[in-house]
Image (spheres, rainbow, N blue to C red):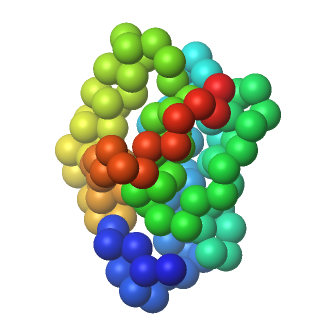
Amino acid sequence: MADPALGPARTMRQHLIVAATVNAVCAGLPGAPKVTALNDGWLMTGAAGASAQCQTLNELWSAVLGCFKDASVLDQLNGRRQAYAADPANAGLPARAAGLLPDPEYYQGDFA
């Protein structure tokens, strides 16, 4: 499936970079999910074990956001995403991956 953030030809390397980016941004937050790269996307596993397979970065961030119930934790996550995307050390795909805001129509709800 084509991904607007990754382009039409996606690679496993891109999926690994995105998974590492999401995991780094979420690290240490209560209820943080674990993201694993797959050949055709990502597997996001919530803290309680529920999981979602995501084929686009938009779907992935929507699923990740669904893991956090506390508004203050969501604020922390969004601040981390902005800081990660703005850091020159994360230029390129990591910055794009961290900075993408998901469409509300893709929000996948409860994965805690």
Q: Is residue 28 visible?
A: no
Say which of 36 and 62 sits in front: 62
- Where in the figure is residue 28, as x and y percent of width and height? 56, 22
Return the x and y of residue 18 as percentages of the image width and height.
Answer: 49, 58
Above or below, comparing residue 22 to residue 42 in the picture: above
Q: Is residue 88 left or right of residue 43?
A: left
**Residue at the outermost front position:** 105
Q: Give the percent coordinates (x, y) of residue 24.
A: 51, 40
- The residue that appears at 52% across and 43% down in the rendered structure is 108
Q: Quadrant of the C terminus?
A: top right
For the image shown, how many numbered marks are present on the structure? 0
Residue drawn at (40%, 86%) of the image: 8
- Depth order, front residue of 18/50: 50
> Which residue is located at x 50 percent, y 80 percent?
1
Quarter of image, res 23? top right
State left or right for residue 49 relative to residue 98. right
Asked if one can make out residue 74 in the rendered structure from this viewpoint, the answer is yes
Give the residue at the far bottom of this rendering.
9
Position of 48 with respect to 19 (left or right) is: right
User: Against 64, is 44 above or below?
Assistant: below
Of residues 93 and 34, the one drawn nearer to the viewer in this rendering: 34
User: Where does the image place residue 10, in percent across and percent down from the top left?
Assistant: 49, 81
Residue 93 vs 6, above or below: the answer is above
Q: Residue at x 51, y 61 (%)?
A: 17
Q: Is residue 7 above or below residue 26?
A: below
Residue 32: image quadrant is: top right
